[in-house]
Image (cartoon, rainbow, N blue to C red):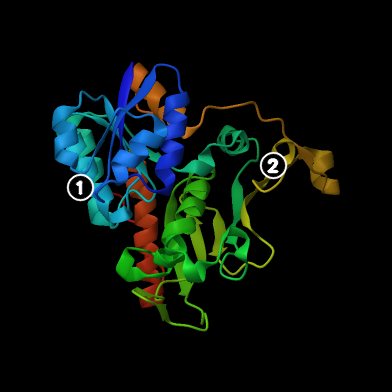
Amino acid sequence: MIRIAIAGTGGMAQAHSRRFQELPGCRVTACCDIQPGRAEQFAKTHGIPKGYTDLDEMLAVESLDAITIAASDRAHAPIALAAIRRGLHVMCEKPLADSLANARRMAQAARKKGVLTAVNFSYRNPAATQKAAQIVRSGRLGRIMHVEGSYLQSWLISPAWGDWHTTPAFLWRLSGRHGSLGTLGDIGVHLYDLAHFVVGPFDALTCELKVFDKGVKRIGEYVFDVNDSLVTTVRFACGALGVLHASRWATGQSNTVSLRVFGDRGAIDLNLDRPAESQLRICHGPKAVVHSQWKDVACPPVPDMYARFIHSIRRRQQGQTSFDEGAMIQSYLHGSLESAQRGRWVKIKRA
């Protein structure tokens, strides 16, 4: 039995609790939240034996194998480091940390202690994503030349997800004071990881970030000072050039994630907004290339990130994805902020 605790009981914690408790041989035995009463209510709702307001108490009292972090970005590093010191395996929400320095501290501590880690990059969950990465790595597309990716949302102009003017869950995402890196840190991180996973590491990038006039500059304690849209040009280590862009102003796009990869022998088109059977399409072979013919790719089922983490613990072998890789994605965020501030290309430094 793998015994796991949840740190942070906000929105994402619901998915963590549900998925881990669905996995055979895995039990969520405790949860923790600094807001009084919140963990106790979460524990009651989700059938978890005990809720705590103090992390150190939970780690001292409970007999755990692992912890999963669904707290705010700023809390990731202190929670992870405390768990790692006790030899616990750790899964963490994205982005790995609130800064590159903290992300690297987390990765280094995990390596030194020899614990297994994972970052919950949820767009690795679809079978189409895993198949896309497999196709690219197999060399089937030949030399990768060009990449185009986007993550588009419209909640700043559409109430489909709720009215952001009155909902703190949206408002904090617009405020640097509340720990937000804007669209870059919220959905850009997913897009960067998707491109990294499918195509490979970034070598350098240049990024432009834009804050648009929303008709109001603040609501209560929330000051709207972080980016709404981003456009990033990437030089990949494999030699390809790519353009990645994301926005919350994408009219007609509720939550659309896509990536197209073009090689000198074929191309793939991944769009996670399409039905599962057509999320991944390929143009490959002499006839298809000449006539621009695309066909759907069959994608067999794969385990999600939660199952991969538990499986890695059972096998005592690192799975997708480690804190080292999470720190690499964090370096792309860090580089994007530096590029936007200085108006130039930034070379991505390896840890």
Q: Is residue 316 visible?
A: no
The quarter of the displayed image where residue 47 is located: top left
User: How would you rate the neighbour count of disc 1 (Cα within 10 Å): few for under 14, some for 14-19, many for 20 or more?
Assistant: some
Tell me whether circle 1 and circle 2 mark residues in contact (CB < 8 Å).
no
Q: In the rendered view, would you say 1 is above or below 304?
A: above
Location of mark 2 (residue): 279
User: In the image, 301: left or right of 192?
Assistant: right
- Which is more foreground, mark 1 or mark 2? 1
Q: Is residue 329 visible?
A: yes
Location of mark 1 (residue): 78
Mark 1 to mark 2 CA distance (whole Å): 38 Å
Residue at the image point whose x is 52% and y is 27% from the top: 303
User: In the image, 23: left or right of 144?
Assistant: left
Amino acid type, residue under disc 2 in the picture: Gln
Residue 311 % position (x, y)? 41, 22
Q: Quadrant of the N terminus?
A: top left
Residue at the image point whose x is 63% and y is 60% from the top: 160
Residue 216 % position (x, y)? 47, 83
Q: Nearer the viewer, residue 316 or 345?
A: 316
Residue at the image point whose x is 55% and y is 63% from the top: 246
Residue at the image point whose x is 46% and y is 50% from the top: 237
User: Which mark identifies residue 159?
Assistant: none
Q: In the rendered view, would you say 87 is above or below 159?
A: above
Badge 1 marks a residue whose secondary structure is helix
Residue 68 % position (x, y)? 33, 36
Residue 236 % position (x, y)? 48, 53
Amino acid type, residue under disc 1 in the picture: Pro
